[in-house]
Amino acid sequence: MNYSAIFKGRMRALFTDVSSLVILIIISVVSVYISIVSQRADSVIETPIAVVNYDKGIWGEKLIKVLSYEEDFDFYVTDETQARKAIARNKAHGLIIIKPDFSEKISQGKYKSLFSVTVMSDSYELNAFTEVLINDTIKIWMEALTEGKLEEIANAREDEIETFREDAMEIWGGESLLDIEAIMINNMSGEEKEEGNTYSGIRWYAALSLFYLIIGGTWMCDYGSRGLLKRVIGEGGNIALMYISQALPGLIVTTVMLIPVLIAEKSSGNPFFILFAYVLYMIGASGMALVVCSFSGHLSNLVLTAPVVTMAASLISGLLFKLPNWAKFWEIVSVVFPGHWFVLAVQGNHFFLGAVITGVVWFLVGMITAWLLGLRR
């Protein structure tokens, strides 16, 4: 059996089938659009942090002004009642309460119990904005300390100046400069904040690629028939090699069409690493498509099953959206899908062994399924 001729014939069929090309182009365009939109959203959205100011002096106002210069956060002033309502409704991801004696302690050079911080444990890490808060408070602390020392330093003795320098060095060199009363709470009723839009377009492209394989897999429907098995065996061929020869053109074309999406992502990640992970993903996806197409048998059935299978596999794998915290069972189940390991790959996590195993297993399951169905039909 001439596998090279089978490969060339399938490749020629891909480029002459207008409907198949249109579907693939639409998938690529949609993925590029998702990449652009998600990046714009990441660059515009600022994390809202509520600030309640009980301070009776000037330094609390100055701290709020300094915080307002931060680009990644939206520190807005409100009263405590509204702030806690915002926390409960997940409209604010953190709450800072500046205590009444803030200015008094700052003026005296003290830094204990200046404010309290409340943060949503299921939507934001505590250190993410408390680090900013600490840095900005240090600026205020140093400004107040300098103002209080100016007259004294003007007539100070050498040992007093040295003491001031040592105090300043101790402040900047300390591992923990401020004592913050931090509270982490769980919001069971509010919506969960999704973990960024990392590689959104690429993940959607991977999900839609599975749809492309299934909806365009009419040629795979024959693998579940006894006639094809007899013909291949009669010509001394190998059914697995024949499938690889026919599936390889689709893998090559979809991988090439991923390149515009990678360009649109403008990410600092290694594009060759993503392409490699995608190839491993497509090996497993091809096995899944073979199983679905073998059971379907006809194009009319594929039209109905392709959207359902794609949506289910992609949602469980986390390709389209991150699974919520309550869906731990499905997160465990997702390890059997190639999409799970592709998501880990684009996030920069270890994926290779799991991707290879799921890819090989799904390929074998596809071959065995087609062979068993061929014996029955």
Image (spheres, rainbow, N blue to C red):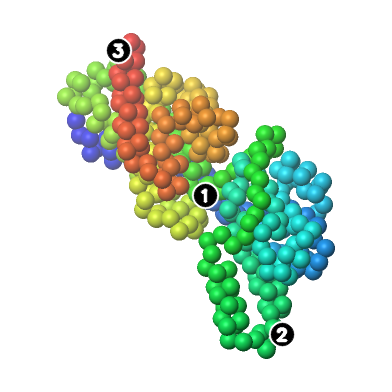
**For discs 3 and 1, the disc positioned in front in the rendered view:** 1
From the viewer's perspective, tell me whether residue 102 is left or right of residue 370.
Answer: right
Residue at position x 58%, y 77% in the image: 163
Place of residue 108 in the rendered image (x, y in percent of width and height, measured from the top left): 72, 69
Place of residue 326 in the rendered image (x, y in percent of width and height, measured from the top left): 58, 30
**Residue type, label 2:** Glu
From mark 3 to mark 1, how far is it between C-alphas?
A: 45 Å
From the viewer's perspective, tell me whether residue 172 is left or right of residue 278.
Answer: right
Residue occupied by mark 3: 375
Q: Label 3 crowding class (10 Å Cα cut-off): few <14, some 14-19, many 20+?
A: few
Looking at the rendered structure, the secondary structure element under dot 1 is loop
Residue at position x 49%, y 21% in the image: 301
The quadrant where residue 60 appears? bottom right
Looking at the rendered structure, the secondary structure element under dot 3 is helix
From mark 2 to mark 3, how far is it between C-alphas?
A: 97 Å
Place of residue 271 in the rendered image (x, y in percent of width and height, measured from the top left): 40, 54
Residue occupied by mark 2: 151
Looking at the rendered structure, the secondary structure element under dot 2 is helix
**Residue 76 seen from this side:** no
Residue occupied by mark 1: 198
**Residue type, label 1:** Thr
Callouts 1 and 2 close, C-beta under 8 Å: no
**Residue 113 seen from this side:** yes
Residue at position x 38%, y 39% in the image: 281
**For discs 1 and 2, the disc positioned in front in the rendered view:** 2
